[in-house]
Amino acid sequence: MEIMGVINLDNEQDFLNELTYFRCGAAVPFGGRYRLIDFVISNMTNTGFIDIAVFTRRKYRSLMDHLGKGKSWDLDTKYGGLFILPPDWNDPTDISKGDLQHFHNNLDFFHRGKAEYVLISGSQHVCGVNYQEVFDHHQKTEADITLIYKKVDILEPEHKQCQKLAVTEEGRVVEVTNEEYNNNVYMNMYLISKKLLLQLVEHGIAHGATHLFNNCITSELKNINVQAFEYKGVHCVINSVQSYYKNNLKLLNPDFYRDLFFNEQTINTKVKNEPPARYSEGSHVSNSLVGNGCIIEGTVENSILFRGVKVHKNAIVKNCIIMQRCNISENAILENVILDKEVSLTEGKRLIGNEQMPFVIPKRRVI
């Protein structure tokens, strides 16, 4: 099996408000040490992908800094590897629009790759998909395209923004909808042969299409064999501040954390050398994830602290997500708050958010 990966970020909006002021959504920190893009890249490399391209259009400096040459995912190789492909429209005759521009203007990536299949994905679905199983299903059903979906037991608010699949008993996709009460949540991932992909791109551009999936693939559901692969592992969608907050704190559930990180699909991220967290006498920490390099002198409950966070004496942090190198001064109180990187909270300040609407502070602010 040879598959090349495309992480298409072109259609992902700045859905996390203050957290995406200075970065694209795929670069947003998650779970104490990761970024959202780590999950899809790790899933691809776990399955043996050699060539992975990232299509991005804006706010990609932070993403490039995080990914580098792909060393953390063993993609810093002489042949193939990780390709970050921002827009570069130098062809004056180019008439492509939308995300089809990325495919058209990066045809060299596809032509040079030896793989016969392409796995295309976004970054909003946090999961541990085994793409080998997807490929086997694709071959068994003789599919032209295989869409990956999750059948959720309970529809959450974040699922309303997701597309849904109408699937026959034989597993064929007959419609892609926005039905509110359809439980088949499309995970924005699909497997397709490279030959068919390039044909659809060429046809779509010639007919003025702007979106590969919504315009070029869904319009062909009656003409080609589009199959559905049901992913049954742990899964969450990050497409709003509320879903980001809720699903981060869900990691404090040992079962959820174990199912996401301790399975066959290892999740890798950029390696940073930090000393162990230090807990001073009199500090109190319960039911929390605390990253390396943190110094805890106060109280931390039901929270996630990224690397290098300092919580000073008599400070209280409850139900919060505190990103890298934040400084919480003495007697400060935080509850239901998200602090982006390098925020400083001065002595005695009090920030109280709501579980349904957490208080979000952009990076490098002094409060």
Image: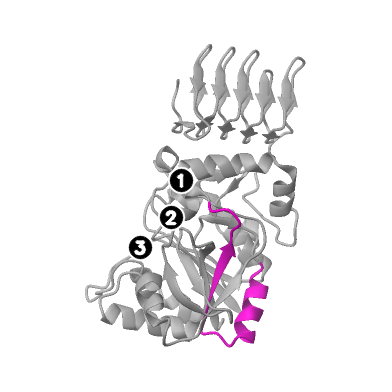
Give the position of the C terminus as an image quadrant: top left
Q: Earlier in the sequence, mark 3 or mark 2?
A: 3
Lateral position of residue 223 relative to residue 32, left or right: left
| Image point (51%, 46%), residue name | 28
Residue at image mark 1: 240
Mark 3 and mark 1: span between their CA atoms?
26 Å
| Residue sitting farthest toward the left | 92
Q: Earlier in the sequence, mark 1 or mark 2?
A: 2
Mark 3 and mark 2: span between their CA atoms?
26 Å
Vertical position of residue 356 compared to residue 67: above or below: above
Query: Crowding near pointer 2: few (<14 within 10 Å), some, many (20+)?
Result: some
Residue at image mark 2: 161
Measuring from the top left, give residue 119's x and y in whole percent: 54, 72
Q: Which mark is residue 211?
A: none
Lateral position of residue 82 relative to residue 140, left or right: left
Q: Which mark is residue 87?
A: 3
Query: Crowding near pointer 3: few (<14 within 10 Å), some, many (20+)?
Result: some
Marks 1,2: beta carbons within 8 A: yes
Mark 1 and mark 2: span between their CA atoms?
10 Å
Is 142 magenta? The answer is yes
> The residue tagged with tag 3: helix, strand or loop?
loop
Q: Which residues are magenta?
A: 130-155
Given residues 91 and 12, the one toward you in this image is 12
Given residues 258 and 180, the one toward you in this image is 180
